[in-house]
Amino acid sequence: MNELIKSRLGGLRKSLEKFSKQMAEFELKSDNIEKFSDMVYSQMKEVGFDKVGKDKAGNVIGVIKGYDSKQDIVMISHVDMQGSAYFKHGIAEAIYAGALIKRALIPLTGDLIVCCVPRAECNDYGIRYIFSDFLKERLPFIKGVILCEPTDFNVYLGHKGRIEYEIVVKGKLGKDFLENRGVNMLGSMFPLINELEKASHTLPTDCELGASSLKIKDVEYQGVMPVKDNKEFKIVVDRAFVPEESSSAILIKAKAIGKNVYKEGPEVEVNTALTKSRIKTYTGLEMVSEKEFKPWKMESHNLLAIDSLEALKENKFNSSIGYWKKIITEGSFTYGKLGIPTIGFGAGAEDFIATPAGKVTLNEIEKAIYGQALIIQKNIGMPTFGWSEDEI
């Protein structure tokens, strides 16, 4: 059977090469996401998906029908609303893994559902909508999720969480601050920035996911000199955190740092408004979505992980269990929120600086497609009872 899968993959090479070139040449921008989604939609139709559609959030969904719909696998790739295109090859991998399953006539006990979801910066509105709409009724029957993200052909099982917040300091900040501009204003911010820098060196570390991090993303000063002493500045913080931490504890700690720095006079608030974002899709749908990603780490003895790793090793993949240290995926929602067994598998290294989209070769994409097909076959493929390729 696996030799049959390999031979069918060879037959898809010309089509895959053409589509990969189209994606590489497509200059993805925030105002042409619809055109890109149309291209993905058309490709799913062209390679023979049984059902293809788009929803109001801009998700593109393709289905390869199995013999039942009670044991489904969902494959997820993403497209960035901001136009970031580092991992576009994951879209090709997902589409052609589905096409390969279809061409090889692999009998499935459930449906294979391939989704290309839109995502804004630090915002996973696409995946949230698809599970509240198209996948809502299927939720009890989903056996697992495959994230088509860079794993260097390993099986990844989790990553750190991420949250954005702002520390707001307002009120009486001292005579020097009120009477001067520029450097003195920054000087009033410096004590807080310095304390945040110190805090960044004492954050917890997870043995698999790596260290938490704290980065200052932006600073903003409001107020017109020199009329009133009610001035205000904001420091926007980008915080990655491990499962041992919680977002609520992080926000409490941030406020405590600010109050300790400015003990007299100014008021210190931690504004979590940045953790929510109002999104309007190209379809006209308006949503308010959280800008917080939960950390997640699935057990390595989960059956989906065990079976997937076994299928890869049986077919000469030098794969092992791993975890993302930098990027954030939809696993924060599928496993972190919903508890659906979730793994990641794909071509390319996680460090997009080392392997941007254009640097992932066609051979590597083909290898990822083959590996994903093996994972699907292992998890929802029907037993073939020793049939050989000639008998099929």
Image (tube, rainbow, N blue to C red):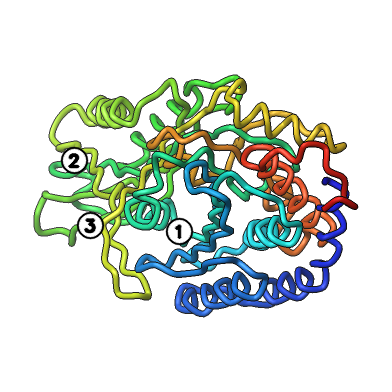
Residue 144: image location, x then y, percent: 53, 39
Determine the CA span between mark 2 and mark 3: 16 Å
Determine whether 297 is above or below 60 in the image: above
Q: Secondary structure at mark 3?
A: strand
* 114 relative position to 123: left or right: right
Q: Closer to the observer: label 3 or label 1? A: 1
Q: Residue at x 63, y 49 (%)?
A: 149
| Residue 110 placement (x, y as % from top left) | 55, 46
Tag on residue 174? 2
Under mark 3, the amino acid is Gln
* Image vertical order of residue 88 relative to residue 270, above or below: below
Query: Which residue is disc 3 drawn over?
Result: 222
Amino acid type at image mark 1: Arg
Q: Which mark is residue 119?
A: 1
> Mark 1 and mark 3 in contact (Cβ < 8 Å)?
no
Reply above or below: 256 against 86: above
Could you give the CA–CA distance between mark 3 and mark 1, rounded to whole angstroms?
Answer: 31 Å
Q: Counting other residues with Cα less than 10 Å from the Cα at mark 2, is it few (<14), some (14-19), or many (20 or more)? A: few
Identify which residue is drawn at 69% across, 62% down.
99
